[in-house]
């Protein structure tokens, strides 16, 4: 089956929250995917490996959470892997990334060590925040990753602030600022649009529209769910929509956005139509949707299966895919053992990394 045929049959979520076989965005705003011939086999294999690492890491995190080894909040990225992997491929190591609490996938995509991420999830001193931040609060100055943030939408003005710093210092870098469809309704997001447009800040706003704001479908929490990519247009910010399940579509959207921002035209907004397979967090049984809905997406628009089909078009053999799978499994197992055998933080750490004002 040709890649165009696959794309046309992918599901989208209608206003009712049910899946339907159509794309309602204005044609000029839809980003067409790259053709399979426009991406190298080595790049595509790396994308598949990166997405598989996120998938297996998150599955292991879910298992450890169920065993009581991970406490607190834990929001998984399963199903959305193509978004962050595709966007990361279009920026440089000098650019910045900031996101919300569904952040493990972003950390792994930018190259943060799975050992350090897993150790932080388990609350160990070898974690990225010394075991004190947990799932939602990890940072990496080395990777220009400015965190997961637990407050819905609060990372959006921070992302614009990072972009402002780049512009103020005369550096031709940008900030990818991720947030969900639920956070897109926050007032501070629109204040940020205004300032970012006014100052032509080098920021890419990315709505990861996974169809649900916690347990509320996008059709129930958004007055115009078919036009979310247009949220910035009143401020002069162009918006585009892309199939967030397709690594080739994300790459194309990322390329368009990065070229726009680096040319000095100011911010841009991308809406990535994606889907999360698990509940909002590990404590969410997701009873607000049917098993048939989730299975439909898994069967017709899974990011890993789509990438695998592209690899097979390029002649990659099943044995090579099995080798990648084994490599990823070993990485996740090694990270898990590292975390489990790391020490818990010394109680004295409760008093470090704290700013006190008189």
Image (cartoon, helix red, strand yellow):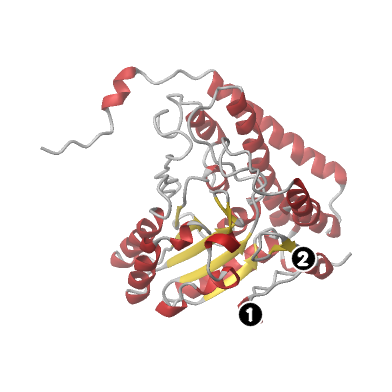
Tell me what residue is drawn at x 51 percent, y 62 percent. 206
Residue indicated by mark 1 = 26
Name the residue: 43% across, 39% down.
Answer: 138
In this orientation, does residue 177 appear?
no
Q: Nearer the viewer, residue 60 or 327?
A: 60
Q: Is residue 133 left or right of residue 230?
A: left
Q: Is residue 347 left or right of residue 2?
A: left
Q: Count the marks: how many?
A: 2
44 relative to 252, above or below: above
Q: Quadrant of residue 62?
A: top right
Question: Going by the image, does 62 lie left or right of 74?
Answer: right
Residue 145 visible somewhere in the drawing: yes
| Left or right relative to 211: residue 187 | left
The mark that comes first in sequence, 2 or 1, is 1
Q: Is residue 309 above or below residue 172?
A: above
Q: Position of residue 287 (x, y in %)?
A: 65, 43
Residue 276 lies, in percent from the top left, at: 64, 49
Describe the element under mark 1 as helix, strand or loop. loop
- Residue that carries the numbered disc 2 in the rendered image: 36
Q: Quadrant of residue 130?
A: top left
Is 349 above or below relative to 356? Answer: above
């Amino acid at each position: 089956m040709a890649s165009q045929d696959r794309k046309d049959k992918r599901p989208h979520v209608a206003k009712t929250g049910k899946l339907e076989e159509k794309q309602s965005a204005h044609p000029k705003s839809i980003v067409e995917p790259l053709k399979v011939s426009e991406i190298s086999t080595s790049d595509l294999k790396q994308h598949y490996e990166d997405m598989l690492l996120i998938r297996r890491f998150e599955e292991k995190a879910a298992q450890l959470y169920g065993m009581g080894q991970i406490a607190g909040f834990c929001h998984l990225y399963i199903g959305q892997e193509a978004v962050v992997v595709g966007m990361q491929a279009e920026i440089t190591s000098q650019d910045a990334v900031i996101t919300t609490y569904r952040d493990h996938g972003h950390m792994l995509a930018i190259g943060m060590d799975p050992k350090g991420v897993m150790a932080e999830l388990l609350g160990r001193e070898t974690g990225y925040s010394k075991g004190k931040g947990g799932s939602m609060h990890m940072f990496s100055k080395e990777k220009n990753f400015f965190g997961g943030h637990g407050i819905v939408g609060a990372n959006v003005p921070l992302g614009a602030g990072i972009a402002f710093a780049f512009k103020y210092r005369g550096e031709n870098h940008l900030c990818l600022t991720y947030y969900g469809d639920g956070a897109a309704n926050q007032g501070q997001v629109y204040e940020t649009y205004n300032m970012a447009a006014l100052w032509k800040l080098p920021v890419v706003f990315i709505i990861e529209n996974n169809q649900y704001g916690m347990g509320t479908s996008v059709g129930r929490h958004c007055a115009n769910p078919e036009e979310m990519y247009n949220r910035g247009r009143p401020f002069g910010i162009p918006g585009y929509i892309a199939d967030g399940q397709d690594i080739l579509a994300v790459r194309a959207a990322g390329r368009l956005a990065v070229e726009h921002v680096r040319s000095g035209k100011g911010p841009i907004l991308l809406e990535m139509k994606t889907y999360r397979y698990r509940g909002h967090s590990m404590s969410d049984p997701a009873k607000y949707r049917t098993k048939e809905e989730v299975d439909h997406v898994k069967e017709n628009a899974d990011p890993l299966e789509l990438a695998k089909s592209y690899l097979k078009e390029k002649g990659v053999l099943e044995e090579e895919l099995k080798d990648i799978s084994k490599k990823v499994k070993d990485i996740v197992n090694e990270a898990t053992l590292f975390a489990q055998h790391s020490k818990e933080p010394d109680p004295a750490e409760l008093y470090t990394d704290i700013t006190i004002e008189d």
